[in-house]
Each structure stands twice: as C-alpha cells, then as structure tokens.
Image (spheres, rainbow, N blue to C red):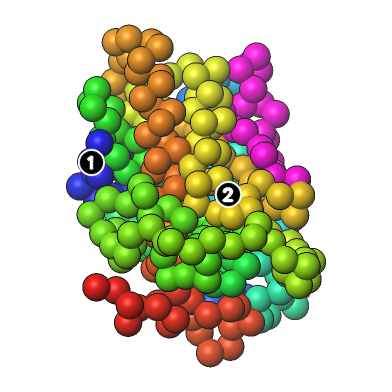
Amino acid sequence: MQAGSRNLITDVDGIIVGNAEDAQIKTGVSVVMSTEPLTAAVHVMGGAPGTRETDLLAPDRTVQKVDALVLAGGSAFGLDAASGVADELAREGRGYRVEDQTVPIVPAAILFDLLNGGDKAWHNNPYNALGRAALRNVSDDFSLGSAGAGYGATTMDLRGGLGSASVTTHRGFTVGALVAVNAFGRVVAGGGPQFWSAPFELNDEFGGLGPSQKTQPAWEPKDLAFASQNNTTIAVVATDADLTKAQCLRLAVASHAGMARAIVPSHTVFDGDVVFAAATARRRLENLDLDLLELCHAAAHCLARAIARAVYHASREPSDKHPPCWRDRFEDQIP
C-alpha cells in the first residue's frame, strides 16, 4: 500500500472537506461531504459519545444516503454545527426528498473542548455559524493540526488536533481517514517522541522516528484527574468502493483497530470514540470478501496514521490551557 498524492481523505474520489475555527473560543468544526450523497454507517466504542442522527445509519433504516458528516468541538453545544450545515444544504436543494420538501441528512459527532482556555461565555450558540462556515470552505485541500474540529483538542500529555491520511490498496481502491484527536490516552509511547502509530508510518509523514523501545502503563492514578475534562476521538473513514450500509458498518468497526493502535488507552469510559464510514461508490467490488478485507485493513491503517499526524502538526498559542504541542517538545529530535 502507498499513500495517496495528498495523503488526505480527499484522495478518495469525490470527497471534500471544510474546516472552520474560532480562535477566541478555541474550537472548530469539520465537514466531510461529496459531490453526491454518501452511503454511510457509524460505530461507537467510547463510553461517553455525543452524536446526532446516528440511529438512521443502521443498515435496516429507511434512509440510505447522507449529505454530509460533521465533526465538532463544543460538547453537546457542538451538535448545532450540523443544523447550520443542514440549513445551508437545504438552501442548495440537497437532501432527502419527501414530496415537495427537502431534508438534508447530516449525522454528527462531538468532542469536549470546553476547558481549554477559550472564551466560552457566549450569548448565542456559535456552532451553527461555524458549521455554515466549514461548509463554505469545502475543498480537496485543508490544514492539519490545530484546525477544524481539532482546533481546541488535547490528549493526555500533548495538544491534540485534526489529522488525515490516505492509502491506495493493492486491489486499486482508495481509502482515507479524517480524525479529531481529543483522547484521554496518549499518542506517543513512553513519554515520546515516538508515536504508537510508528509501525504504520509512510514516507516519514510524522517525523520518521521509528517505533519506541519504551513502554508505559495504560494509565497511572494521577492521570485520572485529566479524565474529569472529558475526552473523545471522532473520525470519518472514506473509500471510493461501492459499499452497502452493512459493508460501511463493517468498515467503521474495523477502523477502530487503528484507534487502538495509535492511542493508549483507547475506547475508555471517559472517551466518546466514534467512527463514521462513508463510500462514494466510484469503484465496484470485484471479489466481495477479499476486497472488503483489504478495505477494512486499509481503513485501520489510515486512521492510526491520521491520529499521529493530528498531534504531529498541532501548534500552541500562549493563552492555551493545553499541554504542550508535540513540535514544541520534540521537533529538535527529528532526524
């Protein structure tokens, strides 16, 4: 397998991404969509998720396509970002048709970034406007690190962020991942600088430091104080394969393996870990079992790399209550 030309989820034919941030609030929103509605599913493995319209993504539900997927900061307030996206899509005439009405289908997931030093004393929920802004910014190119839904994110010991990665499989499919990393666990091994994702790195995309020889306990008693801040890693994996909703669900389930490879510990009771899987249906499956096997492996591979890239590219501002960013601590150790 090799990384796509951009090494972003937008290497998947048809996928576009938009980010918007508010530097004063220290939060942001990311929107994933395509030129056509997407087949999508979701799988939740964290103990404290925050989501919208995820029940309809089950394979037995009536609605078969979604118009956009939203990742946002802001905890429960951030779910309003999906309303802003839906309002804008309705004005464009995009959505599920019911006689003369159009209802955009916009599932969403949120992370908790309310204690990061930003001004959260708003009079009106800002996330509707952030969702609209992110939708206006959709493109096949976008920033990583302190951007979009990862703008105000943290991990146990380093600043979190927004990450993405892609891969072209041996059988010719493209798979990509987008992730906002706000985890209870750690993304670097044994205090760093090496990432847990290092065995899966392509082209020195997060420093080329290789795997760590150090180990660490899953957590220590002092780490539990961090859990009170609440956490969550939320992601979208996408492919150009023509998948059903049931196959997208399998892709989402398999992708969580990438999260477990990149964050220690992951899927805790303090996290709301969510993965959406989306398919643009540009390439048909030729061998159902083998193609799906490879797609699931590639999705986990991409998500592990995207998580490391989120932290690797993050930056820090003087007013942050965040822990330090990876580059502040370790950039001088890059070969």
Residue beneath disc 1: 2
Tell me if mark 2 has few (under 14), some (14-19) or many (20+) residues whose alpha carbon lies within 10 angstroms of its own. many
Q: Is residue 210 left or right of residue 272?
A: left
Q: Foreground: 35 or 220?
A: 220
| Marker disc for residue 163 | none
Number of marks present in the image shown: 2
Question: Disc 1 residue type?
Answer: Gln
Check the image and name the residue furthest to the left.
5
Question: Disc 2 residue type?
Answer: Ile
* For marks 2 and 1 on the same chain, the one whose residue lies earlier in the sequence: 1
Residue beneath disc 2: 234
Is residue 35 shown to the viewer in this render? Answer: no
Q: Quadrant of residue 275?
A: top right
Identified at 25% across, 44% down, the residue is: 3
Q: Considering the image in quadrants, where does the C terminus appear?
A: bottom left
Tell me if mark 1 has few (under 14), some (14-19) or many (20+) residues whose alpha carbon lies within 10 angstroms of its own. few
Please check the rendered image and state whether residue 12 is part of the magenta-colored stretch, yes or no: no
Give the extent of the magenta segment: 40-62
The kind of secondary structure element at disc 2 is: strand
Q: Cα distance, mark 2 to mark 1?
A: 24 Å
Rendered view: 116 above or below 31: below
Identified at 41% across, 31% down, the residue is: 297
Rendered view: 219 above or below 48: below
Q: Quadrant of residue 112?
A: bottom right
Nearer the observer, disc 2 or disc 1? 1
Is residue 234 shown to the viewer in this render? Answer: yes
Rendered view: 6 above or below 121: above
Please check the rendered image and state whether residue 48 is part of the magenta-colored stretch, yes or no: yes
Q: Is residue 115 left or right of residue 212?
A: right
The kind of secondary structure element at disc 1 is: loop
Q: Position of residue 90 (x, y in %)?
A: 54, 39
Q: Quadrant of residue 320?
A: bottom right
